[in-house]
Image (cartoon, rainbow, N blue to C red):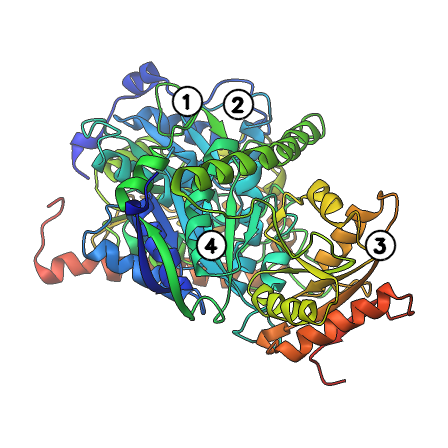
Amino acid sequence: MSEILKTRQALTGNEAFAYAMKQINPDVVAAYPITPATEIVQIFSKYVADGEVDTEFVAVESEHSAMSACIGASAAGARVMTGTSSQGLALMHEMLYIASALRLPIVLAEVNRALSAPINIHCDHSDTMGSRDSGWIQIYCENANEGYHSLIQAVKIAETVNLPVMVTLDGFIISHGMEVVETLDTDAVRQYLGKRKPMYNVLDYENPIMVGPLDLPDYYFEHKRQQIEAMRKAKAVIEEVVTDYNKRFGFDFPVFAEAYRMEDAEYAILVMSSAAGTMKEAVDIMREKGKKVGLVRLKVFRPFPFEVLQELFKNVKAIGVMDRADSVNTMGGPVFNEVRSALYDLNSRPRIMNFVFGLGGRDFPLSDALYIINRVKELKEGKSLDFVEYVGVRE
Amino acid sequence: MADNFSISLKELAKRNKGLASGHRACAGCPFPAIIRMTLSASDYPVVVANATGCMEVTTSIFPFGAWPVPWIHSAFENAAATISGVEAAYKALVRRGEIPSDKKVKFIAFGGDGGTYDIGLQALSGAVERGHNFLYILYDNEGYMNTGIQRSSSTPYGASTTTSPAGKVLPGKLQHKKPIVDIMAAHGMPYVAQASVSHWNDYVKKVRKALSIEGPTFIAVYSPCVPGWGYPENKSIEVAKIAVETGFWPLYEVENGYYKINYRPRNPLPIEEFLKSQVRFAHLLNHPEAIEEIKKFIEQRWKFLEFMEKRREIEGIKEDV
């Protein structure tokens, strides 16, 4: 496809999400505002007020009801979206499992923020990591541009595999930071997505179905197994959708993970979301000094791309995994635990340690990024280090 | 109530749009009858959302389903929010021409008292405030029966439940029922009513009236519980009737804020008749002060209803406008 389909716009992360939603023009949006995702709902409701979308906008009284209404609307065959953050996602928690198990392709624009207590409105990943086992596909974006395009792709992914998808951007750092976003023409977006074609819906009263019945021990396990299988199949769907999108619109978005200067890397850092920018800068500095360090930015956390990471890390001697959340299991953060598990089967297993950083919006300066690279270098050189380090905290 | 909402028992039976036999509700449970009456009363196709509870678990055990209409259950506290979404989808799809606009569908949410008075009150209040076009039917059996007969905020004063047991010190539940119908009426909804499974004609008329209205409507229907209340399984309708005849469960409706009592027991039965008809109150017969408390509650409720009913008179508004 030609370049004329694209426009360069200065947008914040929230604006990019809201603009994508406007172009998608979903049938139903049910949402409740929460910092730092408030603007998504706010901007979208202005689109509704100005008639720029003809979405049925349900301004619910809580995030629990937002996800409940999304479930009802999606089961009725509508294309459905919502947006939230932090406590809002936590309040949806019960309904997240129901949305995924009912195989409803709901798309959620998520802005990462710390969970209470202490109450904090700034970025970390404890909110979405708390939902990691809820059966939702989780896509973590580095910047607003990727967030915009991933949200459009998410609709396609969700409706192909019949699973809900959350696309995340880092709170304030990206949600409120302005950058250049390369947007598509609205027509191109609508043509690309077409209409949702559900297999069944609860508005078809001539062919009544029951959605969400009771499963006793004789069926629950089979239904869960099918859901798990859908998540496995989602890997191929994500790959297909992102590859096709790149080809169709002339982009180069990574599918599961972005490899940065990994070709001859002897040791590497794995990080998600916006911190990858700072980390790339640090890698460049170290590379100039002749250090053979690389970076992997993990983009899809659910389904977890085990095979991709095994391939990327098969030749490195040491890895530092960065977590912007802790699982409070005393053995490191959630990303670390999964990466470590993924690498267990490698013939030559790299040494690996965890860096928990940036909780509650704590700044992540270049000096910390360089510190982490140096620590992983020491690890590569055989130094014995603590399993987990907390970077940027006073202790 | 205007008679155009009446329907004969014969006609109702002929429609028979009810629950399939073979559902697994307890013997004598009245809610299958409530479902049958509701679905048969509707002149329109309906889509149902069900809160988690007895009604849901006994009618939807996979791979069997007892409902002849589209049905969705998602969680305990959110039948109103779930049906909000279904109704919003309907509106969007009609607007976009995906569903022909002449295909009228009515939306009904069913919830028990736990899912309505307690954990579901927020979602219900929100959905009503937003003005979704749906009928919420509360089947009130005055407790969390599905989980083993615990108290809810609908459980009456003095009732013994597994979380408000009558013991050596406490006489069962220490609080009165929450006035859910008045709480809903205070939302300014177009139609709210209280009915009983024992008075089928009154209930069916109320359902038909509610379904004729655009916007949120609410009916609380009394639905005694055989194991929860402790009475023989052939007595459900009789026990519900005694509740009405003793004045414990008045039949009334509130239309755009105007109250109307639909039935006044000619010779009200003493409340003891109701209390002694079931095990959950058995211990009260030795607690005259508790019985006095219940009598006072009933008296105050009736005073309130009669006071509220005077509004029409004060404003000079004729009935059934």
For residue A154, side relative to residue B321 (left or right): right
Measure the alpha-carbon separation of dots 2 and 3. Answer: 53 Å
User: The C terminus of chain A appears in which quarter of the rendering?
Assistant: bottom right
Q: Position of residue A153 (x, y in %)?
A: 45, 43
Label 4: which secondary element: helix
Dots 3, 4 in contact, CB < 8 A? no
- Of B82 and A384, nearer the camera is A384
What SS does tag 2 mark? loop
Name the residue beneath numbered marker 2: B65
Mark closest to the chain's N terminus, 3 or 4: 4
Q: Amino acid at mark 4?
A: Glu
Of badges 2 and 3, the one in the foreground is: 3
Identify which amino acid the numbered label 3 is placed on: Pro
Q: Are marks 2 and 3 in contact (CB under 8 Å)?
A: no
Disc nearer the start of the sequence (4/1)? 4
| Measured Cα–Cα span from mark 3 to mark 1 | 55 Å
Q: Are marks 4 and 2 in contact (CB under 8 Å)?
A: no
Q: CA distance from mark 3 to mark 4?
A: 30 Å
| Nearest to N terminus: mark 3 or mark 1 | 1
Residue type of the residue flagged with mark 2 = Gly
Please state the chain letter of the residue tagged with numbered disc 2 in the rendered image.
B
Relative height, residue A116 to residue B90 (above, below): below
Mark closer to the observer (3, 1) = 3
Disc 3 on helix, strand or loop?
loop
| Other residues around mark 4 within 10 Å, as few (<14) / some (14–19) / many (≥20) | many
> What residue sits right under mark 3 in the picture?
A350
Are discs 3 and 1 located on one and the same chain? yes
> As shown in the figure, which amino acid type bears the numbered disc 1?
Pro
- The picture places residue B288, in percent across and down from the top left corner, at 58, 61
Q: Relative to A172, is B283 above or below?
A: above
Q: Which residue is mark 1?
A: A208
Task: Confirm or deny contact between disc 3 and disc 1 (CB under 8 A).
Answer: no
